[in-house]
Amino acid sequence: MPHIGAPELILVLALALIIFGPGKLPDLGKAVGKTIREFRRSSTEIMNEVETSASEEKKKDDQLIKAAKS
């Protein structure tokens, strides 16, 4: 996957400034920041739920194995 370098970043920022204007850029930045924060929070919650579910399944499997051995 190609990385974004300085020239590409400058081009994107210049296009954003031309398209949205200097007055709207702070609002656009806030919206992007909120979106990224929400995505990270949601992905963390999902990861925690998956880990919790996996550990519960492992406990159940361990109990079944223990019961089968006795």
Image (spheres, rainbow, N blue to C red):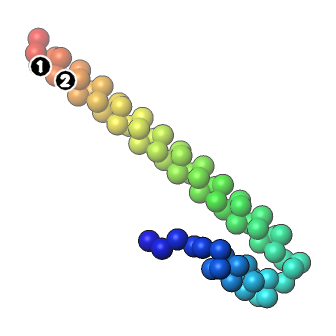
Where in the figure is residue 46, as x and y percent of width and height? 48, 47
Placement of the C terminus among the 4 image quadrants: top left
Q: Picture quarter containing residue 5? A: bottom right
| Total numbered badges shown on the rendered structure | 2
Secondary structure under the numbered disc 1 in the rendered image:
helix
Establish if 59 lies above or below 11.
above
Establish if 31 lies above or below 45.
below
Residue at 60% of width from left, 49% of height from top?
41
Q: Quick one: which residue is furthest to the bottom in this view?
A: 18
**Camera sees residue 69:** yes
Q: Quick one: which residue is furthest to the top in this view?
A: 70
Residue position for label 1 = 68
Count residues near mark 2 (Cα–Cα under 10 Å), then give few for <14, some for 14-19, many for 20+: few
Secondary structure under the numbered disc 2 in the rendered image:
helix
Placement of the N terminus among the 4 image quadrants: bottom left
Establish if 45 lies above or below 38.
above
Q: Amino acid at mark 1?
A: Ala
Q: Amino acid at mark 2?
A: Leu
Where in the figure is residue 65, as x and y percent of width and height? 16, 22
Horizontal side of residue 19 vs 59, given as left or right: right
Residue position for label 2 = 64
Where in the figure is residue 40, as x and y percent of width and height? 59, 52
Where in the figure is residue 11, as x and y percent of width and height? 68, 83
Residue at 70% of width from left, 66% of height from top?
32
Residue at 36% of width from left, 31% of height from top?
55
The foreground one among 7 and 22 is 7
Cα separation between marks 2 and 1: 6 Å
